[in-house]
Image (cartoon, helix red, strand yellow):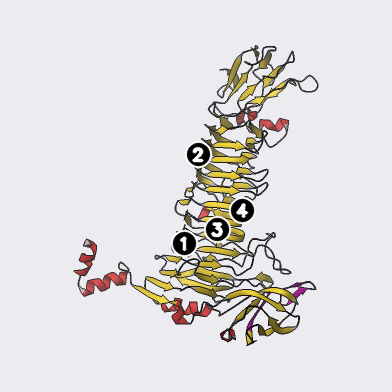
């Protein structure tokens, strides 16, 4: 109240100066219907005949639909003898409501064909945007209804879009996500040698008033196709069938050219559905931009829900029936990012990809989310590479086979640095085959990974807590609970390769089933068994029954054994046989006898490059 009293006491000239400089925001509220917009779109089925303009339907259309846009899926220009583009045309006449004459003949006989009919609202929205003038915060209200949009190639736009927005300080507000629908063109056509459906909204530079936000709330952004997430995810979309990952079909595209910037972009209580490309996507590199997404639902998408560059604040949303949740390219985020308290379910492929690390990029946190993931062989969180990343307090409920929860340094390197300063802590995982894989080849290697206080239930008894590839340093496992007989640590290569992976420091406070030696404790050819720290620090010989068994501690890759590493031999449950453990693989520095009933531990003295008795 004191603030408003102070403004009221200002002189007229002083108040004008405040408004002029933007300290007091003017506001103009518009209604989209005042600019000719109509929310009359319908989606239904029609019957078509090849080379005929007449289509029939059981869904009667009013005569007011004459002159409006009609999309008929699969009825356009042939691409092969058995494939057709979609048809985008207009209605010439209507007889009895069910006999529709189009301005262009269909090129395929279909019974039935999916169709969309409605007023094209693209020019009406562009008129409303132009009408907001120079105010710093305007509201465009959209009443209940289904508003159809047909893509146009606007000057200054990146590709074909329906709404080109180069003006910030605008809030686009619907009557409710299930009441107001912006229905994008779902029909594909071959344009300039590509399969094109078009973007619904494009935010493009140069952007006027980028210091003020743009927001979308209480809307549905609909891609206009009958099914978004299909069995076909190859890209670009086929120019024969239109199938696949359509890089031209996004709900919102953010495009920045020539070093420009975008404003804060907010989405609240929206539904984003039925898209063949990334639902929200960035191209080029927006500077100093942020995105906030709150209480939204992303569903039925053939690609990722989010592939956007700005700093994230993505909180309390639902991601359902998508090819992949998100890909986050860290390099261009100028502020810390957060992905938290979201529900993720029914994902067709990998869960969340993070790349673009620079080593100095802003931190990114994935926290307190619930993941229900069922894709066989999927990586749930994968990096290539990530830096300054924290994944904390999430739940992973897995139901597919062969799933890896964390794949650090996976294939598909995109960045200028390595995987570094990554924390995985406090997560609960049920039913996974592999909890954490890391290593990768340079520059996708790992330098700095802490995995602590996670609780993990394996899919089967031979599942792995950790599997290593390539090279890594400064990797630390502490306080994790790997239950139900987990096979704890394993290299991605065969026996000699198991030496690779000794770079992971595994504390004694990790709970897991130790690697167990059975009665077969000599390799073929009477060769002494070499024990690698890559198997994990704990060994048990409860089943040992053979005599003259000998082990040697592997030390040939000493630069990969972390300071503080130890190996514990537990022979306490064996009352029959003892065995010798040599301090070196060369068997030249002596040995320690582990008698029946005894428990002996060795530690790595990195100053001397040798194993010593603990």
* Label 3: which secondary element: strand
Sequence-wise, the earlier of marks 4 and 3 is: 3
The answer, for residue 227, to whether it is visible in the render is yes
**Cα gap from disc 3 to disc 1, whole angstroms:** 16 Å
**Label drawn at residue 269:** 1
Q: Where is residue 271? Give x, y as percent.
A: 52, 63
* Label 1: which secondary element: loop
Mark 4 and mark 3 in contact? Answer it, CB < 8 Å: no
Query: Which quarter of the figure has residue 159?
Result: bottom right
Sequence-wise, the earlier of marks 2 and 4 is: 4
Residue 391 vertical position relative to residue 48 in the rendered view, above or below? above
Which residue does the numbered mark 4 point to in the structure image? Answer: 347
**Cα gap from disc 3 to disc 2, whole angstroms:** 25 Å
In the image, what residue occupies the spot 65% across and 44% down?
403
Mark 1 and mark 4 in contact? Answer it, CB < 8 Å: no
**Cα gap from disc 4 to disc 3, whole angstroms:** 13 Å
Crowding near the residue tagged with mark 3, few <14, some 14–19, many ≥20 C-alpha atoms within 10 Å: many
């Amino acid at each position: 109240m004191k603030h408003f009293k102070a403004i009221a006491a200002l002189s007229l000239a002083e108040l004008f100066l405040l408004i002029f400089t933007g300290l007091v925001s003017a506001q103009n509220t518009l209604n989209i219907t005042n600019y000719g917009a109509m929310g009359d779109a319908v989606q239904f089925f029609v019957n078509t005949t090849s080379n005929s303009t007449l289509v029939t339907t059981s869904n009667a259309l009013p005569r007011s639909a004459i002159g409006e846009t009609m999309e008929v899926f699969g009825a356009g220009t042939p691409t092969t003898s058995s494939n057709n583009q979609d048809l985008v045309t207009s209605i010439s006449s209507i007889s009895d409501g069910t006999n529709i004459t189009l301005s262009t003949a269909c090129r395929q006989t279909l019974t039935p064909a999916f169709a969309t009919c409605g007023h094209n609202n693209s020019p009406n929205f562009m008129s409303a945007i132009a009408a907001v003038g120079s105010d710093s915060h305007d509201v465009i209200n959209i009443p209940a209804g289904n508003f159809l949009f047909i893509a146009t190639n606007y000057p200054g736009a990146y590709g074909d879009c329906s709404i080109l927005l180069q003006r910030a300080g605008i809030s686009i507000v619907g009557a409710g996500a299930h009441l107001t629908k912006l229905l994008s063109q779902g029909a594909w056509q071959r344009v300039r040698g590509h399969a094109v459906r078009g973007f619904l909204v494009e935010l493009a530079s140069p952007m006027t008033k980028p210091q003020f936000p743009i927001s979308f709330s209480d809307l549905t952004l609909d891609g206009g196709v009958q099914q978004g997430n299909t069995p076909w995810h190859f890209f670009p979309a086929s120019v024969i069938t239109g199938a696949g990952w359509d890089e031209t079909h996004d709900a919102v595209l953010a495009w920045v050219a020539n070093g420009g910037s975008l404003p804060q972009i907010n989405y609240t209580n929206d539904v984003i559905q039925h898209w063949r490309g990334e639902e929200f996507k960035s191209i080029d590199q927006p500077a100093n931009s942020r995105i906030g997404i709150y209480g939204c639902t992303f569903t039925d998408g053939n690609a990722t829900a989010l592939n956007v560059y700005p700093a994230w604040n993505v909180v309390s949303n639902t991601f359902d029936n998508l090819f992949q949740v998100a890909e986050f390219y860290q390099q261009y985020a100028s502020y810390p990012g957060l992905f938290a308290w979201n529900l993720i379910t029914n994902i067709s492929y990998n869960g969340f990809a993070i790349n673009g690390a620079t080593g100095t990029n802003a931190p990114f946190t994935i926290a307190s989310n619930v993941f229900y993931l069922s894709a066989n062989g999927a990586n749930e969180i994968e990096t290539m590479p990530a830096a300054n990343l924290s994944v904390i307090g999430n739940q992973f409920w897995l139901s597919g086979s062969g799933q890896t929860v964390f794949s650090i340094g996976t294939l598909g390197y995109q960045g200028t640095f390595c995987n570094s300063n990554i924390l995985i802590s406090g997560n609960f995982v049920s039913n996974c085959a592999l909890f954490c894989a890391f290593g990768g080849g340079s520059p996708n290697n790992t330098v700095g990974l802490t995995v602590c206080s996670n609780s993990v239930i394996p899919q089967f008894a031979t599942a792995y807590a950790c599997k290593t590839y390539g090279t890594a340093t400064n990797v630390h496992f502490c306080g994790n609970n790997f239950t139900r007989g987990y096979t704890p640590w394993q290299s991605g290569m065969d026996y000699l390769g198991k030496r690779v992976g000794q770079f992971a420091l595994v504390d004694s406070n990790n709970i897991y089933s130790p690697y167990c030696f059975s009665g077969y404790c000599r390799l073929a050819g009477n060769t002494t068994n070499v024990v690698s720290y890559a198997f994990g620090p704990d060994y048990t010989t409860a089943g040992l029954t053979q005599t003259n068994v000998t082990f040697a501690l592997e030390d040939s890759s000493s630069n990969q054994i972390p300071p503080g590493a130890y190996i514990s031999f537990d022979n306490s449950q064996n009352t029959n046989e003892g065995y010798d453990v040599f301090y070196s693989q060369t068997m030249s520095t002596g040995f320690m006898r582990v008698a029946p009933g005894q428990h002996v531990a060795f530690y790595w003295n990195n100053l001397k490059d040798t194993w010593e008795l603990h």
